[in-house]
Amino acid sequence: MKNATHETLGASAALAVCAVAGVDALTTCAAVAASLLGSRLPDADQAGSKIHRRTRLERRSVALSVVGFVLRLPLRLFAAIADHRGATHWLSTTVAVSAACGAIAAAIHTALIVPVTAGIAAGYAMHLLADACTPYGAPLLGPVRRQRVHLLPARWRIPTGSRRELGVWLAGLCAAAALVLAGPLAG
């Protein structure tokens, strides 16, 4: 799946979690922002993926460019040695990464623990579930079982960049819009 699809599905999931939990608008915004990062993290094992690229702010600021380079250096080293859709596509990795990000958030400010952990988990999990709907599948049950999981029958699987993926993206976008209009961000 493409980045936009992963990000939209992750944001929709974070909005749904926040709607169910009944949290305020600021917490919802933090969770959605974290979900965008979470939706990109599984592809840290693929050089050139969106998480490895500089942002627009980094391209405009030398200081931010240096900070971004330093922060992405471990990811680049990891991508050089890891296989795509390997360990980063395990459900157990979702739990570990979410917990680690929650711990980092706790060190910054305790109020960030829940929205960051929930947002990272929502974005990361939706990325894995979306990839398990593609023809290639995803090894969701690793390291216990390395076999690729397919959540859809072979004829219904969603190739990257296809019209089916566009439909998934549009459905995620509509779900996100409905959740925003009905949730704490509406008023």
Image: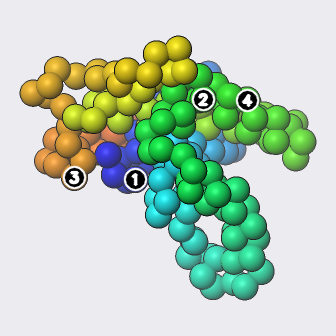
In this orientation, does residue 120 appear? yes
Give x and y (percent) for residue 52: 56, 62
Q: Residue at x 31, y 31 (%)?
A: 137
Give x and y (percent) for residue 23: 66, 30
| Structural distance between the alpha carbons of marks 2 and 3 | 26 Å
Which one is nearer the viewer's eye here, 49 or 164?
49
Question: At numbered mark 4, what does the secondary structure look like: helix, strand or loop?
Answer: helix
Check disc 1: other Cα within 10 Å, few if <14, some if 14-19, many if 20+: some
Question: Which residue position holds label 1?
Answer: 3
Question: Which residue position holds label 4?
Answer: 99
- Tell me: residue 124, above or below residue 90: below
Give x and y (percent) for residue 106: 86, 37
Q: Residue at x 68, y 28 (%)?
A: 96
Question: Which residue position holds label 2?
Answer: 93
Check disc 2: other Cα within 10 Å, few if <14, some if 14-19, many if 20+: many
Question: At numbered mark 2, what does the secondary structure look like: helix, strand or loop?
Answer: helix
Q: Type of residue at label 1?
A: Asn
> Of callouts 3 and 1, which one flags the residue occurring earlier in the amino acid sequence?
1
Q: Residue at x 59, y 29 (%)?
A: 94
Question: Which residue position holds label 3?
Answer: 161
| Structural distance between the alpha carbons of marks 4 and 3 | 32 Å
> Of callouts 4 and 2, which one flags the residue occurring earlier in the amino acid sequence?
2
> Of callouts 2 and 3, which one flags the residue occurring earlier in the amino acid sequence?
2
Q: Type of residue at label 3?
A: Gly
| Structural distance between the alpha carbons of marks 4 and 2 | 10 Å
Check disc 4: other Cα within 10 Å, few if <14, some if 14-19, many if 20+: some
Q: How is the image coloured?
A: rainbow
Quarter of the figure with residue 57:
bottom right
Q: Residue at x 40, y 53 (%)?
A: 3
| Structural distance between the alpha carbons of marks 1 and 2 | 19 Å
